[in-house]
């Protein structure tokens, strides 16, 4: 599976457009073995009755030098089926194409059954995009009695803005906490660890809503 930062190197430089692209991105993921087995019934479901029946008949009638008898039996109702992603499953499909039992399009349906389509970034937010690209705007905030309170002025996607601090020892800005489930207009708080209460503090402002 691609990670978001890698995907964004190929996406639009505009963050809002990249967000749409990331949410629409799909991957083909191999199913668990038990979920990718092709039986006689599944063959007919995938290819349609006529084409599925032709394919099964061809498998049954094929010489054992081409399709061994034990593989033929795996299609019977009492058997689990054929793992269409395993080498013997792929070889079976190749033979079916070679002997004109199925078309290439039908073969693709069979081999494609081994995979499911996923959208790994379907629920990413603009905040996630900006963090992945390291271009998220921030605003300075002040702690009072060990807490920072922020107030949002507009509705945003549900996200968890980081509470950041300038680490004087390393010269880097680091995350020390998060504001949780920020989306509605209102106030949100986050606790500042004791060691950072005299440091310069900042909060993510990905939506310009603070």
Image (cartoon, helix red, strand yellow):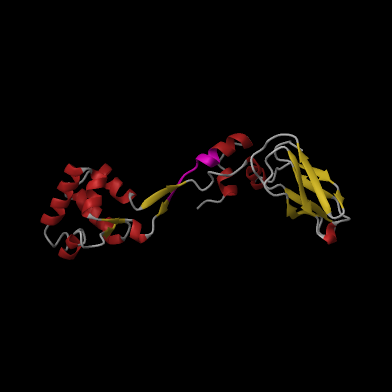
Query: In the image shown, does 190 or 66 lie closer to the viewer?
Result: 190
Query: Residue at position x 25%, y 57% from top?
Result: 91
What's the magenta region? 21-28
Query: In the image shown, does 122 or 101 lie closer to the viewer?
Result: 122
The image quadrant that residue 199 belongs to is bottom right
The answer to whether one can see residue 84 in this image is no
The answer to whether one can see residue 38 in this image is yes
Q: How many marks?
A: 0
Q: In which quarter of the image is the C terminus?
A: top right
Q: Residue most toward the right?
A: 198
86 relative to 68 in the view: left or right: right
The image quadrant that residue 73 belongs to is bottom left
Query: Residue at position x 20%, y 58% from top?
Result: 75
Q: Please tell me whether residue 72 belongs to the stretch shown in magenta.
A: no
103 relative to 15 in the view: left or right: left
The percent coordinates of residue 174 (x first, y second) are 76, 54
The percent coordinates of residue 6 (x first, y second) are 57, 48
The percent coordinates of residue 7 (x first, y second) are 55, 45
């Amino acid at each position: 599976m691609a990670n978001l930062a890698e995907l964004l190197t190929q996406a639009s430089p505009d963050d809002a457009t990249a967000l749409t692209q990331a949410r629409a991105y799909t991957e083909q993921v191999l199913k668990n073995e038990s979920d990718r087995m092709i039986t006689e019934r599944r063959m007919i479901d995938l290819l349609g009755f006529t084409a599925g029946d032709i394919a099964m008949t061809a498998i049954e009638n094929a010489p054992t030098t081409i399709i061994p008898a034990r593989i033929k039996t795996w299609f019977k109702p009492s058997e689990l089926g054929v793992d269409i992603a395993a080498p013997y499953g792929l070889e079976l499909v190749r033979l079916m194409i070679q002997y004109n039992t199925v078309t290439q399009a039908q073969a693709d349906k069979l081999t494609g059954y081994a995979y499911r389509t996923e959208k790994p970034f379907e629920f990413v937010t603009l905040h996630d995009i900006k963090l992945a690209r390291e271009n998220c705007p921030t605003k300075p905030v002040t702690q009072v009695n060990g807490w920072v309170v922020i107030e949002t002025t507009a509705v945003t996607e549900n996200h968890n803005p980081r509470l950041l601090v300038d680490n004087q020892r390393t010269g880097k800005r680091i995350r020390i906490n998060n504001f949780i489930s920020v989306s509605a207009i209102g106030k949100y708080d986050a606790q500042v660890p004791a060691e950072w209460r005299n440091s310069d503090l900042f909060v993510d402002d990905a939506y310009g809503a603070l």
